[in-house]
Amino acid sequence: MSSETAARPLRADARQNVDALLEAAKDVFAESGVDAPVRAIAGRAGVGVGTLYRHFPLRSDLISAVFRREMDACVEAADELQAAHPPGEALDEWVIRYTQFVAAKRGLSSALHSGDSAYEPLSVSFSTRLVPTFARLAAAARDAGEPVADVDPEEFLGAVANLCHGGGPDAAASGRAERMVRLLLAGLRSPDAPQAS
């Protein structure tokens, strides 16, 4: 959102418009990538293009807001999973959630590596939020006596992301990515995997 919009609280109808725009943009980006026409996003949200630009003056503002919101949900899921499952299962389920998060973000990688300074905070959030979340879940599983390889969290999440790209937005590609990530998880969780010292 523009810095003006972020500085003052939104009216309820404006908040609904922002939520509708973010949800529509998430879906359109998943289907068509981050270069999808803003008219398609506004139409799906049920608002005019002017409303979209009022809240998100630049495409990068909208992209960043969508990915930040989705990243927040992915991080928050870790606590929910830890409360509901044993540590090893919480780790596995969170990695699958992360896989679904990444697989649905067509164009995120190219946006993050575009050199556009608007995306710098997203890269920082990846390192300061998602990486520690994985590390915390892996440590909890290890502490509970589960076999979890001593891997670099950033490298592991990068490997998961690499498995998610290139397959397209369809369900078959998403399913392939998830199957490959489950194989990666099996290796991470193998009793023969190198353990933390």
Image: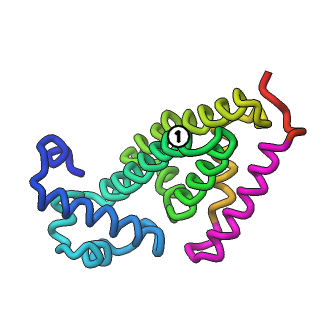
- Residue 82 falls within the magenta-colored stretch: no
- Residue 144 place in picture, x, y as percent: 71, 30
Which residue sits at x=56%, y=33%? 132
- Residue 177 falls within the magenta-colored stretch: yes
Instruction: Locate residue 8 relative to residue 33 in the image: left or right.
Output: left
- Residue farthest to the right, as pictured: 192
- Residue 96 place in picture, x, y as percent: 62, 55
In the image, residue 176 sits, relative to residue 194, either above or below, namely below
Displayed quadrant of residue 87: top right
Q: Nearer the viewer, residue 109 or 133?
A: 133
Which residue sits at x=78%, y=43%? 189
In the image, residue 21 sits, relative to residue 101, either above or below, namely below
- Residue 3 place in picture, x, y as percent: 19, 44
In the image, residue 25 sits, relative to residue 94, either above or below, namely below
Classify the position of the C terminus by image quarter: top right
Give the residues drawn in magenta, as a range.
166-190
Displayed quadrant of residue 11: bottom left
